[in-house]
Image: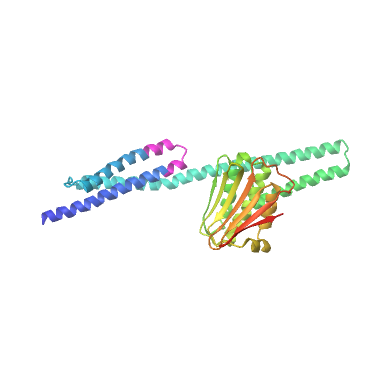
Amino acid sequence: MDALISMDAQIFLFWVLLATCLMHWLTVFLLLRRVRFTEKPLVWNLLSAAVGLLAIQKTYGVSIQFLEHNPPLLNLVSTGLGCAVAGLLLGGIMQLSPFLYLFQRNKELLDVIEERNVMILNFHERIARAWQTIQIAMEVGRPTASIIEQVAEMSETHQVFLADLKAGVLLGNRFEVALKTLVEDLSREASFPITVHVDSSYENHLSREQGTELLHIVREAVRNSVKFSHAKKGKVFAKMTATDTVIVVSDNGKGFEVDLVRAQGQGLGNMVNRAKKIGARLKIHSQPSKGTSVFIEVPLNEVPSDGSHSASTVHSSSNSTQNVQVG
C-alpha cells in the first residue's frame, strides 16, 4: 500500500516537473518576443538566457525520468519550489508585457507628433514663400493677371492641405509613420485587426508626391476593405523589389468582382487616377470567399508625369485571371 502511494506521489511530482519545464520554455519564448519591442535588448536577452538554462535543467530532469530504468525519486520540496519559481517568472513577464507595449506605443506617438510638426512647418514655409512672392510681384508692378494667378496657386495649396488633413493623409519626412498613422485611424472603424509592416529602406525611394498619392490609394483600399470585405483580418505591407516599390493591401474577406465595383464607383476609379499620376501600376487580385489583395507598384526612379502612364487592374475569379487595361 505504501509503495502504491509512493508511486502515485512520484507520478504527480513528475507532472509537476513537466509543467515547470513547459512554463520555463514559455517564459523564454515570451522574453525573446519582447526583444523586438524594446530599445534595450541586452537585458531581455540575459533574462532569456537565465530562464533558458533553468528550462534546460528541468528538461534534463524530465528526460531522466523517461530514459532511466530506475530514475531517482523526485523530492516534493524541490519540485514544488521549482514549479513556484517557474510560475512567478511566467506571471511576472506576462505582467510586464503591457508596460512594454505602452513604451512602444509612446515611442510611436512621439514619432507621429514629430511628423505632424515637420508637416506643419513645411506648410507654413510654403505659404510664407508664396506670400513673399506675391508681395514682390506687387512691389515691382507685375500685371494683375499674374498676381491673381499666384494667389490662385496659393489658394489651391491651402485646399490641398485641408483636403489631406480631412482625409488623414499627412506626410512629413517619414512615410512609414504616416502610413501606420493612416491605417490606425482607419482601423478604428473596422471590426477586424489590420497590421502594418514597412521595409526600412522603402521610403528612401519615394518622392513626396509619390508618398502622398500612395497614402490616398491605401486609404481608399483600406476603406473599401473595412466597408465591404467582412474580413477577419487585414494587412498593409510595403516592400522593395529589384525593380519596384510595392504596397500590398490585403484581407481575407468575401472578395468581389472588379468590373462590378468599378461600375458602382466604390473608389477604384480614384485609385487608378492617382496611380497614373505617379506612374504606378495598380493591380487587384480577388477571388470569391478568398479575400482581396490590392498591389500598388511604383517603378524605381520613376519620375511623376502628367498622367500618361497606364494603370492596370487585375481581377481573379475561381476559374480564370483577366488583365484589364485602364486609362
Q: Residue furthest left?
A: 1
Counting from the top left corner in percent of width and height, residue 110 is at: 56, 42
Counting from the top left corner in percent of width and height, residue 69 is at: 17, 47
Numbered range of the magenta stretch:
33-47
Question: Does 184 lie within the magenta span?
Answer: no
Viewer can see residue 18: yes
Viewer can see residue 112: no
Magenta span dominant secondary structure: helix
**Taking 237 as reference, is 260 left or right?**
right
Q: Residue furthest front?
A: 320
Q: Residue at x 39, y 43 (%)?
A: 31
Q: Residue at x 61, y 44 (%)?
A: 245
Q: Which quadrant is home to the C terminus? A: bottom right
Height in image: 142 above or below 267?
above
Front position in the image: 99 or 194: 194
**Taking 16 as reference, is 107 left or right?**
right
Give the color scheme: rainbow, by chain, secondary structure or one colour: rainbow
**Taking 93 as reference, is 317 left or right?**
right
Front position in the image: 120 or 286: 286
Q: Which quadrant is home to the N terminus? A: bottom left
User: Hey, which quadrant is residue 33 in on the image?
Assistant: top left
Q: How many marks?
A: 0
Question: Does 38 lie within the magenta span?
Answer: yes
Height in image: 324 above or below 23?
below
Q: Residue at x 45, y 44 (%)?
A: 100
Counting from the top left corner in percent of width and height, residue 293 is at: 57, 55
Front position in the image: 102 or 227: 227
